[in-house]
Image (cartoon, rainbow, N blue to C red):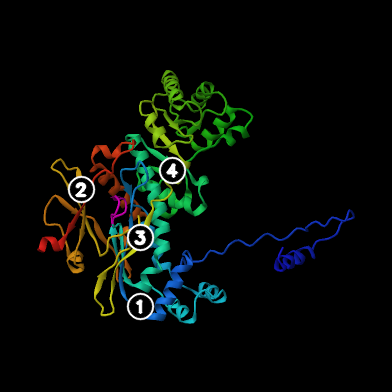
Amino acid sequence: MTDELRGIGASLTDSWPAFDNGVEEPRPLPAAPLPSVRPSVALLTDRYELTMLQAALADGTAHRHCVFEVFTRRLPAGRRYGVLAGTGRVLEALPHFVFEDAELAYLEQNGIVDRRTLDYLANYRFSGTIQGYVEGEVFFPGSPVLQVEGTFAEAVLLETLILSILNYDSAVASAASRMTSAAGGRPVLEMGSRRASEQAAVAAARAAVIGGFAGTSNLEAGMRYGLDTIGTAAHSFMLLHDTERDAFASQVASLGPDTTLLVDTYDVKQGVATAVEVAGTGLGAVRLDSGDLGGLAQEVRRQLDELGARDTKIVVTSDLDEYAIASLAAAPVDVYGVGTSVVTGSGAPTCGMVYKLVARADSSGVLQPVAKASANKASVGGRKAAARRYGRDGYAVEEIMVTGPDTAVAEWMPQSDDLRPLLAPMVVDGAVDSRWVGPYGVANAAVNHGMVRAELPRSALRLSDGDVAIPTVDLRLDDLLD
């Protein structure tokens, strides 16, 4: 034990009383204070973003004009497309990426950056430009889903925040899309809050809705983003009461006969009979949360019909993922509830997105392409434009990656009707476009995803391993000029 640790131990035990048996026991200590909720998100970052800034300020390169791009080198194993989510949250966070007194004091007291850097951070506001794929869009390896343009100092500070949001949200939305596709039009509900940290749960609910989910159990997500919320009762409510009948009667009295009754706490067949007896044939739904869901759904549907509750729906939950949902396609299931699998990306909890510098001004102020050449991590230098090509049947056939001289790429627009440009402006000179944020942004993203997923070839929706849905084709503008 180090002297420092011995000192800490001594200072703690000095306050403990000695009991008759000679054993010292701790006296009760006050509860730890709740962590302060601060409006700034500037420290949701890695230290090296600030140390790079400090060095660049010192050598004079901090104010060089730069272009950063966000992309993924590969999709998770077995995936044929990804779904972009989180750009709205990035834009919502941007005005709060400021270094206020508390953040600056922490950095100074811990010697993390020098005075010149502290002075720069005190006045930091992003004043650059951001464009990217519209939230809800599908993406493939190399797709430039987000471009951040500004000085190196402005743009480098955003790397960790942007990646932490986009990697998680896109992982959830990608999993959600596979699940809602497998559901074949039946509603899928998100109920995974208890399987994620409290703030990740809100983000996951938002991303799941973008991926096609119909609602969430998370009330904060409902309030913040205008999402439909769902939830009635758990097994603990059934066990609270003396009988299952008493629990059902209480729930129906409180919520009405259109509620969903959980019928598998004891015996499913008896539970269904009691549920209909208590709520009547107008019972909204019954929920199954265990056992052979496919077989039980068949039996419960038959029983409900025999009891005259033909309009009562069947909701199934219990560790569902896209494969379990697909296996229930032939069962008389009306609604699926998914928790753990969706909030953890169904086996792919990150999209592997990276934030790379692709162009920067040289000492004379001319923008030059730059690229990483490391083995297995090489990048393509220069600003990109992107478009999607469609066949005569309306299905997507190619992702077009446009490269070449910076000005030509920045000004490029498709010249044929079979190409759709993919980059849209989101921040101009520091001003956030309000179309992409808040409840409207989520609703817009969900509609957008439904449209673009319908444009993918049918093979893209298979859950089996296979190639990406469509190939990416390079289009170099200087080749066309030649």
In depth, the one of 163 and 219 nearer the eye is 163
Q: Is mark 1 on a helix, strand or loop?
A: loop
**Does residue 438 show up?**
no
Q: Does the magenta stretch include residue 220?
A: no
- Magenta stretch, main secondary structure class: loop
**Does residue 307 show up?**
yes
Q: Say which residue label 3 marks.
A: 374
The residue lying furthest to the top in this view is: 306
Q: What element carries label 2?
A: strand
Mark toward the viewer: 4 or 1: 1
What amino acid is at disc 2? Answer: Glu
User: Mark 3 or mark 1, which has the lower sequence index?
Assistant: 1
Instruction: State whether residue 5 is above or below residue 331.
Output: below
User: Mark 4 or mark 1, which has the lower sequence index?
Assistant: 1
The residue located at (41%, 43%) in the rendering is 215
Q: Give the range drawn in magenta.
A: 133-143
Q: Is residue 140 magenta?
A: yes
User: Mark 3 or mark 2, which has the lower sequence index?
Assistant: 3
Mark toward the viewer: 3 or 1: 3
The alpha-carbon separation of the residues under discs 4 and 1 comes to 41 Å
What amino acid is at disc 1? Answer: Thr
Q: Say which residue label 1 marks.
A: 61
